[in-house]
């Protein structure tokens, strides 16, 4: 394997999981609310030859272009089998074009949605812009710099782990009854016997919620100094995202109301445990992540719904917070199970852990 191919593979390692996640988000946004499916008497490709929409807005144009720029960028970076940058661009543009066509075609069967050739063209344009940005980034050496940075700090094959760690702050954007309580709601879905958590239970959930990304990062970061930096970065990102979420959701005056005494204790215990485990070997880290995730999900599974939280959340849902059709909520619910699947796969393959 050539050096250039190795570098491209290292660059694409994180792009692949992010591409899959971003594809899921676009599917969610394009086909929401997933109801009203019916055949409306036209073929799914009829929109291609339909007249252009009469009413356009600057917002519609911008969102259709901007929404597909990251996908074009990620596809151009993720396709490591094309060492040529031009071929990567063409692959990204054609991939975005085909995917956008499929989304518009499916909207033909959704009564609340309208398939549009203008949207298809703007989506493809966004993919082209994203692919050009990837070409420029590689030409300027930015992607190679990231590859070197990643090679110095993270283990090979850590793409999906890093992808989940990147998505973790985004998963925290949707408010939960207890801070860092990702995966909340499974007990209500399964009609389990639930009860309100005690103060100790809340502290434990918060601590486990912060320990999960800390231990996951340890599993792919070999050097002690880099682990220390990661502890600070993850803790600060959690504090920042939770404050931002509450400020945008409930108003600036309530931005820090989430940081109660129980949450402070939970953060404190997590940081202390993270410091004690800084020198833990990789496989032990994966085992601990498994135990931490299962413990937190079990605690959240028996936690009853909070009427006060439900009331404030209903007000939040009618506000101006950018919710991406509730995708952040689903990301928060799915994230711990995706992490659990990753941990199981790592533990099942000793040579990978």
Image (cartoon, rainbow, N blue to C red):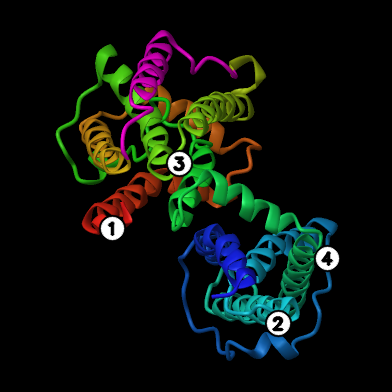
Label 4's element?
loop
Label 2's element?
helix
Disc number placed over residue 351 in the picture, else none: 1
Can you tell which of label 4 and label 2 is closer to the viewer? 2
Crowd tier of the residue under label 2, counting other residues whose Cα lies within 10 Å: few below 14, some 14–19, many 20 or above: some
Q: Position of residue 169 (x, y in %)?
A: 53, 38
Do the residues under discs 4 and 2 have CB atoms within 8 angstroms? Answer: no
Crowd tier of the residue under label 4, counting other residues whose Cα lies within 10 Å: few below 14, some 14–19, many 20 or above: few
Alpha carbon distance from label 2 to label 3 = 33 Å
Residue at numbered disc 2: 87
Comes first in the chain, label 3 or label 1: 3
Q: Residue at x 25, y 28 (%)?
A: 304
Q: Which residue is farthest left?
A: 193
Alpha carbon distance from label 4 to label 1 = 55 Å
**Horizontally, is 80 left or right of 206 in the view?**
right
**Horizontally, is 50 left or right of 151 in the view?**
right
The magenta-colored residue range is: 255-281
Q: Position of residue 123 (x, y in %)?
A: 72, 71
Work out whether residue 187 can be spotted: yes
Residue at numbered disc 4: 56
């Amino acid at each position: 394997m050539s050096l250039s191919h190795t570098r491209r593979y290292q660059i694409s390692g994180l792009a692949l999981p992010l591409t899959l996640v971003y594809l899921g988000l676009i599917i969610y946004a394009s086909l929401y609310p997933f109801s009203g499916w019916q055949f409306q008497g036209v073929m799914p490709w009829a929109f291609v030859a339909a007249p252009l929409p009469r009413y356009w807005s600057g917002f519609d144009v911008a969102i259709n272009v901007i929404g597909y720029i990251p996908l074009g960028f990620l596809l151009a970076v993720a396709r490591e089998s094309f060492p040529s940058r031009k071929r990567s661009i063409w692959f990204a543009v054609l991939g975005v074009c085909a995917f956008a066509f499929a989304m518009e075609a499916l909207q033909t069967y959704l009564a609340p949605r309208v398939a549009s050739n203008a949207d298809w063209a703007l989506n493809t344009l966004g993919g082209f812009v994203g692919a050009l940005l990837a070409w420029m980034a590689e030409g300027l050496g930015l992607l190679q710099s990231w590859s070197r940075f990643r090679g110095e700090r993270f283990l090979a094959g850590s793409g999906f782990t890093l992808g989940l760690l990147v998505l973790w702050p985004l998963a925290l954007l949707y408010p939960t009854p207890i801070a860092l309580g990702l995966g909340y709601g499974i007990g209500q879905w399964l009609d389990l016997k639930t009860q309100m958590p005690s103060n100790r239970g809340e502290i434990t959930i918060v601590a486990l919620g912060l320990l999960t990304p800390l231990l996951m990062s340890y599993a792919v970061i070999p050097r002690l100094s880099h682990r220390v930096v990661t502890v600070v970065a993850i803790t600060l990102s959690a504090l920042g995202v939770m404050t931002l979420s509450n400020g945008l959701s409930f108003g600036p005056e309530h931005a820090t109301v989430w940081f109660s005494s129980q949450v402070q204790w939970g953060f404190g215990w997590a940081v202390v445990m993270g410091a004690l485990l800084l020198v833990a070997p990789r496989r032990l880290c994966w085992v601990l992540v498994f135990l931490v995730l299962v413990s937190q999900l079990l605690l959240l599974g028996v936690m009853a719904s909070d009427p006060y939280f439900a009331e404030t959340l209903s007000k939040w849902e009618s506000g101006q917070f950018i919710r991406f059709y509730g995708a952040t909520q689903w990301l928060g619910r799915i994230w711990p199970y995706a992490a659990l699947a990753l941990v199981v796969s790592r533990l099942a393959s000793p040579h990978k852990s």
